[in-house]
Image (spheres, rainbow, N blue to C red):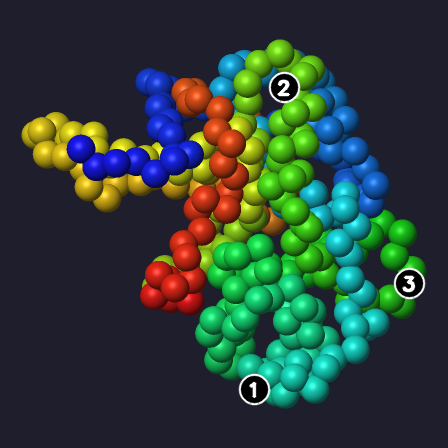
Amino acid sequence: MTQKEPGQSRLHVGDELRVLSVPGVPGIEEGDSLDAIVTECLAEAGIELLEADVIVLASKVVSRAEGCFVDLSQVVPSEEAAALAREVDKDPQLVELILRDSAGISRKREGALIVRHRLGFVSANAGIDASNSAPADAAQGTGPWVLTLPRDPNATAAALRAHLEKAAGVKLGVVITDSWGRPFRRGTVGFALGSSGLPPVSDRRGDRDRHGRELEFTETATADAVAAAADLAAGQANEGRPLTLVRGLRFEPSDDDSRALQRDPEQDLYA
């Protein structure tokens, strides 16, 4: 039997998987308590958390609570950013901000800048978002405003999980999501930017298929799968549904977080 790597546990799905959009999330501003807001929204919706429920939260509300607002008009581009901006035909102030949040450039062409983010994954524009990105108290004449990704989404997921588990008395999972594109595929899909409790990878190596053949390579990106399912319920435009509950999974709590999903750059053929 194939040996499993430490920390990679299995996840099981029952006969029914439910994805529930939790209503009532207010506009989030810097300093707001996500613990309190999530707890209040669940209570107002009459949702009692059950064992192995997974709370899914869009990264944008985390960024807003952390105050990750940037007024691009105040960003001073470096010479490197200015030269790269001319090459890819992008705003030099935006390019400067992308470089600050990146560990390296993966691909570049006119209109596109793909980077390895400081958090370890590869994405367009370092995940910087210009939609719904101004603080409520932004002065007239400032901006344009953008939001950078949360500073430490795994830590945020762990803190929210600890708060909810203490209140509910059950073991939970928490996933912080964002949307990204994939090589050779159109459109974006939700992925796990941060996670806690839920096994990020479900290792099926060593199991057998229906014909008795041993599985040699099968690993399921469970945190990403949960994020993608929640992304459908949350929406991508003006739906205003950043909080989702996924119910119907069975898993043993994991100490791993979303970093377990990242492929070593030396093994990444697309990096």
Q: What is the tally of numbered marks visible in this picture? A: 3
Q: In front of the other: label 3 or label 1?
A: 1
The residue indicated by pointer 1 is: 87
The first of marks 2 and 3 along the sequence is 3
Mark 1 falls on what kind of element?
A: helix
Please state, as top left, top right, bottom left or bottom right, where the C terminus lies in the image. Answer: bottom left
Q: Amino acid at mark 2?
A: Glu
The residue indicated by pointer 3 is: 140
Q: Residue furthest right?
A: 139
Q: Which mark is residue 250?
A: none
Q: Nearer the viewer, residue 200 or 235?
A: 200
How far apart in space, not on screen, are marks 2 and 3 (Cα)? 42 Å
The first of marks 3 and 1 along the sequence is 1
How far apart in space, not on screen, are marks 2 and 1 (Cα)? 49 Å
* Residue under the image location 77 percent in, 43 percent down: 65
* Residue under the image location 56 percent in, 82 percent down: 88
Q: Which mark is residue 165?
A: 2
How far apart in space, not on screen, are marks 3 and 1 (Cα)? 32 Å
Mark 3 touches mark 1? (CB < 8 Å) = no
Q: Nearer the viewer, residue 262 or 108?
A: 262
Give above or below for 37 relative to 94: above
Q: Nearer the viewer, residue 64 or 199?
A: 199
Apparent side of residue 174 relative to residue 250 in the rendered image (left or right):
right
